[in-house]
Image (cartoon, helix red, strand yellow):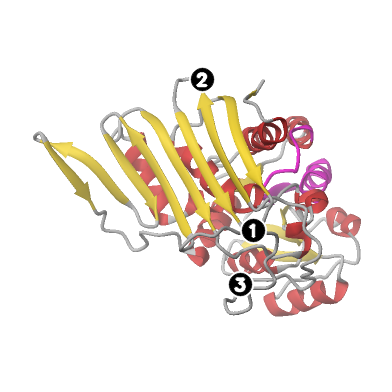
Amino acid sequence: MSRLGVGVIGAGSIADMHLAAYAANPRVQLAGVYDLNQDRAAQKAETFGVARSHPTLDSLLADPDVDAVSVCTWNDSHAEIATAALDAGKHVLVEKPLSRTVVEADALVAAVERNDRHLEVGFVRRFGANARVLKSFVDDGLLGPVYHARATNIRRLGNPGGWFADSGRSGGGPLIDIGVHVLDLCWYFMGTPKAVTVSAVTHNRLGNRANVTSLSRYKVADYDPSRNDVEDFAAALVRFDNGASLTLETSYSLHALEDRLEVAVFGERGGAQLEPKLRIATELADTMLNVDPQIDHLSFDFAAGFAAEIDHFVALCLGGAEQVAPVWHGAEVMRMLSGVYESARTGREVRLD
């Protein structure tokens, strides 16, 4: 196969990143797009030069010109659609989170195992230039064994409303939407150890804060401030089977002085901060050093990150790459996320089997 026929399922805002990256890849033929809103799907097909706007999901999955799909739908359908695509003989790139629950994640792992097809989880920040450089440093032993990580994604006024604020469709709030990015990155740089316990709290006290009109933020088309049953804030401590630890804080709404994004890992020979920009802390000749790598993007660049993720997925499907974010990674991250919610609900530390 010299070119990969790709279908995109879901035509919301995140699908634009996928469609633009696929359209720029010379090894891709954009064969189809499907969305519940057929007018929106047709518009995306026209904009990005997609061969066909499909009237149903079954139609797209039955299309022999579609070899692989991107799943860009609400969280509640990730696992179901990805499973159907695998069973239809398609390779799958599924947006994060992999699912809403551990049960859904495990069922998707089983679907991958019974089909000779690839599934990559959309942990797009792993494909940022800063993340790829840091991963090479970690793999080369620059930091030594990593024994602690700090994951922070704080938004002061960031509840987008709509399906993001509806736990039935989203599976949760900032933890499963934006906290998952920093949790995954830290775990990835730690070498993906097995999580054994989680102790966590969540709070839902501030809501959508629709009263704040002097500061703009992203809102979905069906924004409704009266509907919100997800957490504002989550904090957790995760322990791993190798003795390492990870602390996490994330929020949609918080009385903080500023938004804050931080990914940091600490090892026996050095430490690193990935966000807000890549920096390394280490020692040389009994002297502490802060090192600034010379690369184009010290922070995550969305367009470049999605382009790298899509290019990797295409190469993977065509037999020219190794997996970076396999399905079991998505399932393990889901296990940690579920552990956070369970610990917060019960008010106690929980063990992850």
- Mark 1 and mark 3 lie on one chain; the one further toward the N terminus is 1
Label 3, label 2: how many angstroms apart (C-alpha)? 40 Å
| Front residue of 214 and 264 | 214
Label 1, label 3: how many angstroms apart (C-alpha)? 39 Å
Range of residues picked out in magenta: 77-103
Query: According to the image, label 2 marks what residue?
Result: 241
Residue 89: image quadrant is: top right
Helix, strand or loop at label 1? It is loop
Helix, strand or loop at label 2? It is loop
Q: Is residue 15 left or right of residue 54?
A: left
Label 2, label 1: how many angstroms apart (C-alpha)? 43 Å
* Nearest-to-viewer mark from 3 and 2: 3
Q: Amino acid at mark 1?
A: Arg
| Front residue of 183 and 90 | 183
Q: Is residue 87 magenta?
A: yes
Label 2 CA crowd tier, 10 Å (few <14, some 14–19, many 20+): few
Query: According to the image, label 1 marks what residue?
Result: 3
- Mark 3 and mark 2 lie on one chain; the one further toward the N terminus is 3
Label 3 CA crowd tier, 10 Å (few <14, some 14–19, many 20+): few
| Residue 314: image location, x then y, percent | 60, 53
Which residue is at the far left?
Answer: 285
| Front residue of 165 and 34 | 165
Whether 90 is drawn above or below 192: the answer is below
Q: Is residue 291 magenta?
A: no
- Mark 2 and mark 1 lie on one chain; the one further toward the N terminus is 1
Image disc number at residue 217: 3
Q: Amino acid at mark 3?
A: Arg
